[in-house]
Image: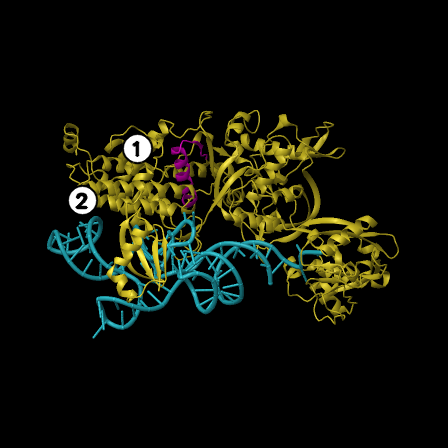
Amino acid sequence: MAETKKEKEEKPVKDMSYNPKSIEQKWQAKWDADKLYRSVIDERRPKHYALTMLPYPSGDLHIGHWYAKTPSDSRARYMRMKGYNVLFPMGFDAFGLPAENAAIKDGIHPMKRTYQNIERMRKQLRSMGAMFDWEREAISCDPEYYKWTQWFFIQLYKNGLAYRKMSPVDWCPNCNTTLAREQVWGDDRHCERCGTPVIKKDLNQWFFKATKYADELLRFDELDWPERVKTLQTNWIDRSEGASVLFKTETGNHTIEVFTTRPDTLWGATFMVFAPEHPLLDEITTPEQKSAVEAYKAEAARQTDIQRGAVDKEKTGVFTGGYAINPVNGQRIPIWIADYVLMSYGTGAIMAVPAHDERDFAFAKKYDLPIVEVIRPEGQEEANELENAYIGAGVMVNSDQFNGTKVNTEKGRKNPGIAAVIDWLAGKGIGKESVNYRYRDWLISRQRYWGAPIPMVHCETHGWNPIPDEQLPVELPEDVEWRPTGESPLKLHPTWKDATCPICNGPATRETDTMDTFMCSSWYHLRYLSPKYDKAPFDDAEYNYWMPVDTYTGGIEHATMHLLYTRFFHKALRDAGFTKGNEPMMQLRNQGMVLGEDNEKMSKSRGNVIAPDILVDKYGADTVRAYIMFFARWEMGAPWDSNGIEGSARWIRRVWTLFTDPTSPPTASDEVKKNLRRKVHQTLKRVTRDFENFDFNTIVSALMELLNEMYKAHEAGAVGTDEWKEAQEIYLKMMAPVAPHISEELWTEHLGKPYSIHQQLWPTVDEAAAKDDVIELPVQINGKVRDRVKIAADASEDDIKAAVMASETVQKYLEGKEPRKIIIAKGKLVSLVV
RNA sequence: GCCGAAGUGGCGGAAUAGGCAGACGCGCACGACUCAAAAUCGUGUUCCCAACGGGAAUGAGGGUUCGAUUCCCUCCUUCGGCACCA
């Protein structure tokens, strides 16, 4: 050993074999020491805020994290080389249930566990060699962070956007907490996090008035977002245009408001239906019907949402004994209750038009209620004996002065029948144009410990009031007891609840619920701007320079959760005067998912998890990065293929071999040199375009292709020529965003170029060099490729024609005939029609 | 039921203004190097017809076009979202 070392010292020999481990460690340390990726405001340069969704500190970096973050990093690096001042921060979404559940099991405090996990994941994230600016790291469970989460809650409260309400809410019996509507998924209405079906509970909870922004959230005109996400959000909000109409009860004691998308069918409303939970039921129900109604209500309450919501379920209902008056024709119509009417949509009461609504039709048939046709297909004279509800276009009949008015299948004012009736209703004061949404306010209370406490106190005299700013943050107590029942330790804590009313200084009780962690992640992109700033959630100077986020990358699963919340949050803050612009994230791109080799979702229980650490250890980060970018279309994702990575490893090694090859005297012909230069610039063009479009897989393909060409040029003696040197430089610059370590090593150590390659500008395409001068034109005869003709790229149509007709093969297929038509697609192909 | 995405070799995928289908890679086969293996390098690799050569083929069927993976219509399959929403 000693001898070898001595030998090395005396006669330094460069180790020529590719050793990713030492290269990667070396450069990561140097970049770090030099603060190469520190981003500071620089007014002279255009800014680019690249953001990738922050991870939950689960404790281990998953291959999925790599799949999300590596291409995002590579794109950020590309933008930096394009001359942008790029901000690419990283942090942790550190509140949440897993840490608390683990604490219940083993007693380790979530704080302790979370920071340990962060420590570990930080290390793993660094092994990626990404350009994260770690000085901007933000951790949402840090009191210096959640102080501002709480502060924002108070701002929303002060602006009338936070309120407390008793209502039936979704409860996950496994997570022991309520959930927002967005967090309940699927046919069986399960918890988004743990998959357990939720149940309904009546609880007092805090909500954000997200519905105030429903219309604005439907506008995407400023956004470069995938259609898919815009569609998901649009469907989620589900705007529905129609009218609200006032019905009076027969006794005249009550007014019942209903929402309908079909006010043009009002004359066909032959009964009304209330949801079983409707508050007016008790007063409308007659004594004779009381027991039947009560029984039905009890049965409906007993059923789960899933049972009630089953589409194919036979309709059931009970007559209340009460009557309403149809305001358009004075008809006395019975009021029923049925569970197909939901209290949570519209007003919980509907006008039933059996002739033109399938559900009402089925109900009327079953209970033998009158069916009156009010829309008839155009041109048809006779009344219909309806076998089904008619929902098509037609003309209004049995509708007094509106008879003959045309009705199409459009919703809202686009439908002449609806427009006419709405105007008339409004004039009479019995109805008006109205819009309904399926979208609900955001329920943010969580009955858990490991979250940001809701900064509100309750006083017997003064009700609910926010904690004064100077008392923020409301910190989580550390001396808590973990109950296996899952009850919130905040509720059980002996003294934590005790507070002072900010109005009267009398005794008050603290809110023991914490906030939905989606609240924390609704503004993390702002905390990154100035994570240590203590005068406000963010420094305005930083905000004015960096915001909005230019490129946001992350998973599609957040389409109606995080991405909707964060848009709402930005708009709410904008109206409160804290943020500018209408949208927080201008461009969005979603990556797909990496599946296990068995084509299933990766999970510990399936045993199909791919650990990036092992791959990095075996191949080096550059190879893992390259493979992740190469093996699938980024937005699609694909199952992992352990063999496939060998291809990327081979590519990296082949680059190393070629670029560390000692120079030899240049012997290449002019043609070889010209062809090399052409391929280099053609590749640069492709790679540039692909980076712009997030087509990461074809970037690596193009680089592999060019490398193959370079090997051929090498064989032909191109080494040492100016073209070769240019090829090497451009190659490494194109490779730098993909494989930052090896390209730095080859750039500085083997090409002897100035450190750092990551501070170089992206090369410019030489269009003239990229142009082909001779091209091979395929010749089609009657649609089939029969020959290929080599010809100058700038040849005239006549020259092309002549060359094609001169071909023996072409003549053979023409069999002496003249082509009827010759189509020349310039630079692409020639097509002969015989 | 409604809305959306996707369907291309054994596999991942490419074809980015309608113009050579299968780039690039995996895998496989053969060859070189080697005592041998690994690594590396080279050649081949959509299918069918013995074949020179030809034919078929981008989920299926139709249409537009000189020409369709690409545009239009109908349908099938897979995945995702919503769903008694008035």
Relative to the observer, which residue lies in front, A501 or A423? A423
Position of A205 with respect to A767 (left or right) is right
Question: What is the magenta range?
Answer: A65-89
What color was chain A assigned in the picture?
yellow
Q: Which residue is mark 2?
A: A715
Residue A169, horizontal then vertical, whole percent = 66, 49
Residue A552 got which mark? none
Residue placed under numbered mark 1 in the picture: A26
Residue type at tag 1? Lys
What crowding class fits label 1: few (fewer than 14 Cα within 10 Å), some (14-19), or many (20 or more)?
few
Q: Residue at x 27, y 30 (%)?
A: A753
Residue A733 on image: x %, y %: 32, 36
| Subunit that carries the residue with mark 2 | A
Q: In the figure, residue A361 lies in which quadrant?
A: bottom right
Q: Colour of chain B?
A: cyan
To which chain does the residue with label 1 belong?
A
User: Is there any visible trace of residue A628 in the rendered image?
Assistant: no
Quadrant for the N terminus of chain A in the image? top left
Q: Are marks 2 and 1 in contact (CB under 8 Å)?
A: no
Q: Nearer the viewer, mark 2 or mark 1?
A: 2
Instruction: Measuring from the top left, give residue A699's x and y in whole percent.
Output: 36, 44
In terms of secondary structure, where does tag 1 sit? Answer: helix
Quarter assignment of residue A411: bottom right
**Left or right of A532 on screen, residue A442:** right
Kind of residue at badge 2: Glu
What residue do we see at 67% from left, 59% from top? A409
| Residue A78 on the magenta span | yes
Q: Secondary structure at mark 2?
A: helix
